[in-house]
Amino acid sequence: MKILVTVKRVVDYNVKIRVKPDGSGVELANVKMSMNPFDEISVEEALRLKEAGKASEVIVVSIGPAKAEETLRTALAMGADRAILVETEDAVEPLSVAKIVKGVVEAEQPGLVIVGKQAIDDDSNQTGQMLAALLGWAQGTFASKVEIIDASNANVTREVDGGLQTIEVKLPAIITTDLRLNEPRYASLPNIMKAKKKPLDKRSPADFGIDTAPRLKVLKTEEPEGRKAGIKVKTVAELIEKLKTEAGVL
Ligand code: AMP
């Protein structure tokens, strides 16, 4: 069984985001970019399934600018077998991403597609679900455990409000990954060198007949309100008094 993993190049999660002066989005010039953290978890899970003998090949795909090749090379250095870059300089919305990935799925015929639960730049949490709908496949979202039972079934444990829920999904299926699924490995230096020689296919959205023109328009982007400075109280009685009269929470 092949596993297809989607990986998105996003602003590194350690970077302090700055909103552009005109409010049209966040500043991307000279900002460190990395693989979306949920996608690192997806790559790790696919590699573990391959190492456990449940998968034969791990293919990674990214839709984005030429520089997304770096993100794909990171996944190859972690251990993925080959990569596909669907190159576009446009910002691609989740529906277009899902349609392009559907095209890749039709060409590659994977038994499992692993998608991050959300991209930390747009926080859409849409792509995996849209892809499942477009393909008419089962989906196990917010996965914290994945077990391949046999060629046609997998169990997915999902993080839900009240705790953990385990479902059985028919394969092929879409899985979206949550934080507690695993801890991704680091790529070793020899593997980073080897990854430079692994195959990377370059395609364009037009190869899949997809027009990536946006359907949404960002009206405004604002910085979150800064936190107000705290105060120190001298006694528990004063704390309770302030919680009652000033904060109004008691
Ligand atoms: P979103 O629906 O935008 O929050 O993204 C959820 C997941 O979809 C991400 O974690 C990625 O796995 C995948 N994804 C979204 N956009 C892209 C992209 N441009 N290239 C590759 N994967 C993507």
Image (cartoon, rainbow, N blue to C red):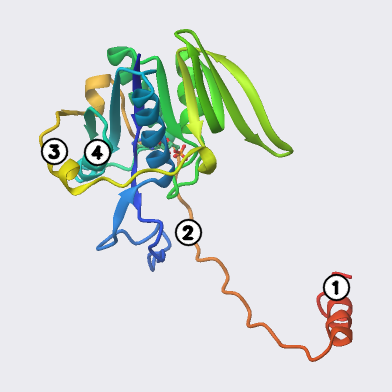
In front: label 4 or label 1: 4
Residue for badge 1: 248
Using a 10 Å C-alpha cutoff, classify the residue at mark 2 as few (fewer than 14 neighbours), some (14 to 19) or many (20 or more). Answer: some
Q: Is residue 34 above or below residue 182?
A: below
The residue nearer to you, when weighing 1 against 201, is 1
Badge 4 or badge 1: first in the primary sequence: 4
The amino acid pointed to by label 3 is Lys
Residue for badge 4: 72
Query: Residue visible at 14% across and 28% down?
Result: 199
**Rounded to the nearest whole Å, what is the CA distance between mark 2 and mark 4?**
29 Å
**Rounded to the nearest whole Å, what is the CA distance between mark 3 and mark 2?**
41 Å
Check if mark 3's residue and mark 2's residue have beta carbons within 8 Å: no
SS assignment at label 3: helix
Using a 10 Å C-alpha cutoff, classify the residue at mark 4 as few (fewer than 14 neighbours), some (14 to 19) or many (20 or more). Answer: many
Query: Can residue 16 be seen in this snapshot?
Result: yes
Badge 3 or badge 4: first in the primary sequence: 4
The amino acid pointed to by label 2 is Thr
Using a 10 Å C-alpha cutoff, classify the residue at mark 1 as few (fewer than 14 neighbours), some (14 to 19) or many (20 or more). Answer: few
Q: Quadrant of the N terminus?
A: top left
In front: label 3 or label 2: 3
Residue 190, position as x, y percentages in the image:
15, 44
Residue for badge 2: 221
Query: Residue visible at 49% across and 20% down?
Result: 132
The residue nearer to you, when weighing 84 against 38, is 38
